[in-house]
Amino acid sequence: MSILSKMLKNKQKKRQNDNYRQQQDPQKPEEQVILRSYLDNVSRIKGELGNSTDLVFREFTICQHKGTVVYIDGLADEKLICDFFIESLSDEEFDSRQEPFQVMADKAVGLGSLQIATEWNQVFDSILSGNTIFFLDGYNKAINVETKGWEMRAITEPSTQLSIRGPKDAFTETLRVSTAQIRRRIKSPNLWLESMKIGMVSQTDIAIMYLKGVANEKIVKEVKERLKRINMDAIQSSGHIEQLIEDQAWTTFPTTYHSERPDVVTSHILEGRVAIIVDGTPFVITAPAVFIQFFQAPDDYYSRFDISTGIRILRILSFYIAIIGPAIYIAGTTFHQEMIPTTMAIAIAAQRENVPFPAFVEALIMEVTFEILREAGLRLPRAVGQAVSIVGALVIGQAAVQAGIVSPVMVIVVSITAIANFSTPSFAMAIAARLIRFFMMGLATVLGFYGVMLGLMFLSIHLCSLRSFGIPYMMPIAPFNLRNQQDVFVRFPVWAMKNRPKFISKGNMVRTGENQKPGPKTKPDDQGPKGES
Amino acid sequence: MKRFVVTAWIAVMCLPVLSACWNQKELTDLAFVMAIGVDKGKDKKFNVSFQIVIPGNVSLMQGGGGQGLPIAIYSSSGDTLTAAARSVTKKVSRRLYYAHTNLIVFSEEIAKNGILNIMDALDRDPEFRTTTQMVIMRGTPAEVLVSSLANLDKLPVNKITKEIKATEAMLGENMQINIDDFLAGLVSDGIEPVVNGFRVTGDIEMAGKAEDLQNTKTKAILAADGLAVFKKGKLIGWIEHEKARGVVWILNKVKSTDVNINWNGKKKAISMVTIRTKTMVSAKVKKGKPVIQIAIEDEGWISEANTDVDLTNPKEIEKIDKLVEEEIKKQILTTVKEAQKMKSDIFGFGERVHRKDPKLWKKIKSNWDEHFAELEVNVKVDSYTRREGIRTNPYWKDLKQ
């Protein structure tokens, strides 16, 4: 393990030295200055961007000054710019005494938020993120107006985290829309947003949102520092960020949470977590994340507490089944036949009579087949998807049994394991269980239930050793904390969840006011015998 | 430190690949022994028969299955049980597996000669369960019972174990006795074990034949029959029928049973079925001699009244209760007499005395059997009729008018 990490480290150093030197080099100061001649400026832009065809230059005249406007087709809102030219520039007389640059700036304010740029860096950044730049002949500065407006996907229903009663909107790829979705849910001045750009080439916009006074300042600082440490050419999705800011790389368990549901992210922010929104990804990361969080579905909070408690316990049980289901089958049939009820042992023996493989191979065949099916189902174009499910039903079903490859019990074991796996609300956690299952199967083959127990012990030790942004991953189960059990195995009634989880949030802890338990409220004077009022 | 961790990790990762599979045995390589029968051998001490289940013929699967016989019998002989069990593997293609053995049958002959030489093997083997039921085969060799088929249960062994269980629950003439119970009775002072008896009647030859199952009334009939009384590991006699129920009753194992009483001069006119019953046995010391007190509380309902009786009258009910009490008392006392005749304390009276007066027990312990034979036993029965079924007065009352 450590050898591998050492190798990786060396590689990283090398790459940093070779590849990224030019990009990290600060440009020389004289090259940074915008030139007075607008034509020179235009040719500079053309030169720097390789004369890209989506660059748009439009010349105009204002107060006898020639100028040009530069933007990128598709990124900037072209309609807005056209309207601006028609209304503001074309048919108005200008006072020649006024400074043309000032006039231009005054007009352009109507277009969007405005800045005066004096350096090329700023100009390129702005153009590439959809802004419009106005150059005027004779000025070594430029007007930088925000005119972002590109085609974006509309807000749709979440596709991976479904809920029955909850809100039906999901994040989109556009950062601004996502932040607005969160803002709309928390109308508090304490909801702070900080932005940064990560990725030396991609310059991806990233925003972190947290509730000031509720979030732990240390964690916020840590999140920011870890984000700043990222030194990559491109950030293509929040998955990248997630892998770069984790505490422990050598684990299958997710130590940050990601969601495409604004309501989930909002509730996490309200608990004191930090949300990391990455432009171009509809999945928002929240950190720190604890183990039990991955078994909390949004519907837990929208339905009554007794029901959601039952369902949550069911989910945890099914997580166990997903991990050790096939392992128990293998251990039971090859080591501990005495533990199976007689009739069942005989029934399984009868079914296995014609199966040529030992239980482990049988289980492996079925599990691998199922994993292949699942993977194929995910990757295939939708039109072919149905064909896969039909074929899949044959492969892990009656046909496989009739062909004498597997026993009917095995089909049931694989199916229950798969279904149990699907019931984990978080895909990241479900996928971890998939991997661990094979590890457990191996242990069960070699050592039986003893091996399964060893595996589970190893797993618990591993889980307890994990941390997410400094917070123990198994919190509040281990270390056990009685006051924070409100939302672990038992979901307390909403009116009884008085405080925010103490291990995450610092500062304002009160979540629910006093006397929130519903029921007919008795007025003080109602307490006497009837008819007295 | 790091180097150590790496080496340790690699070593651990190699473990599953390099090690053999400890104790691994595939289900299909096992022969499930369901029942074991022990008979007296000709040349060697024991002749042991193993009932092995044929899984494919038991389990109901689509297409085939349940066609052939559910069991196969293999037998071998040896001077010890282990020797016999090992030598039988010459005849079986699979590894004999004892964890699901439900029944062990001893022939009457073996039991009379003493089964102490067998029990340790059963108690010691880690695979074999001590919850296995014990049965003594009466009249015929144990192999007959082991190899017999049953029509109601797919697994013949279930017929025997379930039958004992059902009898215990509904009649109370037999009770489940496993190896653990037997050994506990064997080694404890002041109690001797009893074991269920079984008998095959009718055409014994037909017992192991599939064609007998074609008859709605099988020609060979397997039935529980009596309780075997042991003393020092040897069978010394049998307690039958209602007396056997007395044993079960004193041991507080009766769940339900029926008691019949005479009424209006008509024999067995009223039948009462026990719902709940509880037996408490206690010892007293009177003039330096132990006295046993058996108190039975019995609740029941009237399941039959074949005579003119007014069941709406509490006084009549009280009279019935009195008669039931007397009937039970009579039966219990005859049972005790029977056991006293055999000088075997199957009820555990000695244990009661021991608890009551350890000093006295020390004195009389050595010849407890003699004391037991002359023990004064008092029986007190309290019986209550709780209900009369879904009819109050019998039609006999209307017939009278």
Image: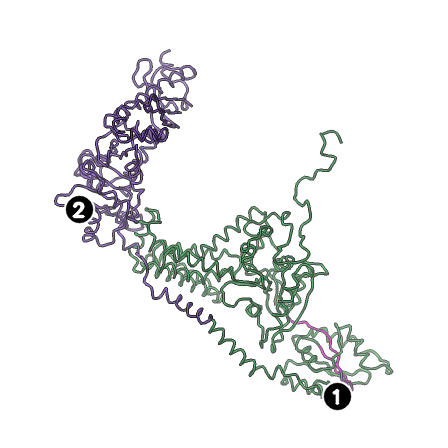
Chain colours: A green, B purple
Give residue A37's mark.
1
Judge from the rendering whether residue A513 lies leftward or rightward of residue A229; answer left or right.
Answer: right
Q: Amino acid at mark 1?
A: Ser
Judge from the rendering whether residue A269 lies leftward or rightward of residue A251; answer left or right.
Answer: right
Q: Residue B178, how many percent across, how many down?
A: 30, 39
Q: Amino acid at mark 2?
A: Asp
Out of A159 and A210, give the one closest to the viewer.
A210
Give the spatial CA distance, label 2 vs label 1.
Answer: 116 Å
**What kind of element bears circle 1?**
loop
**Label 2 in the same subunit as label 1:** no
Residue wearing tag 2? B79
Quick check: marks 2 and 1 in contact, CB under 8 Å? Answer: no
Question: How many discs mark residues in the rendered view?
Answer: 2
Out of A465 and A399, give the one closest to the viewer.
A465
Q: Residue B25, how many percent across, how many down?
A: 30, 56
Q: The magenta stretch spans which residues?
A: A132-151
The C terminus of chain A, quarter of image: top right
Q: Does any portion of residue A387 appear in the rendered image?
A: no
Q: Nearer the viewer, mark 2 or mark 1?
A: 2
Out of B152 and B349, give the one closest to the viewer.
B349
Query: What residue is at 36 percent from the left and 20 percent from the top?
Result: B325
